[in-house]
Amino acid sequence: MRRSFAFKCTLLVIAWLLLAIACVQIPSRVFWPASFGALTLPVALGLNVAAVGYWLLRNWRVAALPALVAVLTWPHFQRGLALHPARLASMRSAPKPTDQTVRLVSANVRIFNVYPQLREKDPRAPAQFIKWLADNPADVLCLQEFYNEPAGGRSSEGRLFRSVDQIGKQAGRQAFVSKTLTNAAGAEFGMAIFSRFPIVGRGTIPFDRLTQNHAMYADLRLPSGDTIRVYNFHLQSMSMDEKDIVDSYSSKDGLKKKGLGLMRRFKRGLVARSVQVDTLIQRFERCRYPMLLCADLNDLPYSYSYDQLADHFQNAWATVGNGVGATYNGALPFVRIDNQFASPQWQVEEFGVNYDIPYSDHFPTSATYRLLVPTAQQ
């Protein structure tokens, strides 16, 4: 009787797992409640692995069923919890750079904490963050929520926030800034790509209208003569205050007071990101160059947005990382919303999250890629 009940539970877990995977494939603009089913995927994956362990102790023949499901769904497991123990030893020695190697850093810099309330905890954060980026040995930097004050800006702090000069020319990099707003004082908001390689092409991809949530790209000429394309994009934000989210589940009346408003904003974000990622996938499919993607997805690895990108590209963390790889610097734990992806022509050699750089609400990510297929041979 107990064994029969356990077997039925195992079948229910497998059905739940398959249903959750199906929910991941459904665009939020078509049926947004499916996203809630997708968010249960890590729980279903964990229970299926637990079922494998249970049946190995009870009946190895029955264990074959959840074990087969675990093998087939392993890529989904790796999205949220990457396991590459062999990589831990190899990480001690950094790969030697070649003419086809690209070292890439991506970071949501939160406008370098230009507003006083953003740097109350650490007034030195803007200067330290800009210096870290300027001194970083990376060949390419992709920055979201970028901020710059050109010469002639505010007299008191203009020199501090001349980020294009410091991260770009003074550090030996070319700069491409996609500006979404220039305020009355001349300060520039948007996104940026900085490159030690020559920029031979560039472009901006707005989503409906040009806002902070958009995409940009730069075509770069490597020392080998190959041309690659680097995309930098920032998908729709939730516009949900972290405190509201924490209050909704930590206080007795929190869900009642905050729940409806959070749900509306959650839905708007889901629908917008599904449209935005589909727009980008269409652009990616027309690109003839090897691609590297840097993104603040504002979405979890178990989402339609991530799924569409993972179907076409290698996720750097899932390919070589170990653990959860959380990138959000805040009260919400285990949240990875910042990602790097690479097209099949690349080998991901290393990837890491810079937890020692706490100057934004996102931790920067760093990766090294090696081009396997020269553009001349494609």
Image (cartoon, helix red, strand yellow):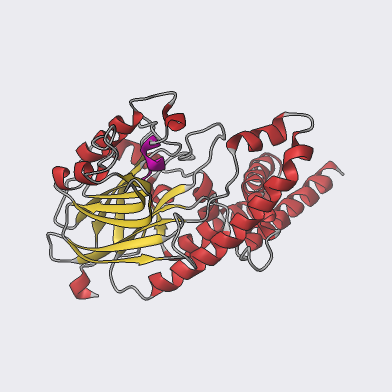
Instruction: Name the residue: 35% across, 65% down.
Output: 204
Which quarter of the rendering shows the C terminus? bottom left
Q: Does the magenta stretch include residue 333?
A: no
- Nearer the observer, 324 or 231: 231
Q: Which of 75 and 239 is in front in this view?
A: 239
**Which quarter of the image is occupied by the N terminus?**
top right
Provide residue 325's location: percent of width, then percent of height.
45, 40
Tell me, yes or no, if residue 247 can be seen here: yes
Instruction: Inspect the magenta stretch and tell me whether residue 112 lies in it.
Output: yes
Q: In this view, does 194 lie above or below 361?
A: below
Boundaries of the magenta span: 107-113
Which residue is pictured at 61% across the width and 47% down the height? 42
* Res. 254 image quadrant: top right
Q: Residue 13: where, in percent of width, then height?
A: 72, 51
Does 147 sit left or right of 45 as displayed? Answer: left
Using residue 192 as the reference point, say whether residue 10 is left or right of it: right
Along the line of sight, which residue is nearer the eye, 357 or 70? 357
Kindly indicate the quadrant of the structure image that contains residue 283.
bottom left
Up/down of 201 relative to 252, above or below: below
Q: Which residue is drawn at 40% across and 73% down?
A: 285
Task: Please identify the residue farthest to the right as the structure is shown.
Answer: 1
Q: In this view, does 113 lie above or below 298?
A: above
| Position in image of residue 206 (x %, y %) | 43, 65
Q: How many labels does the image show?
A: 0
Q: Is residue 92 visible?
A: no
Give the residue displayed 14% in from the left and 43% down from the top.
170
Indicate whether 325 appears above or below 285: above
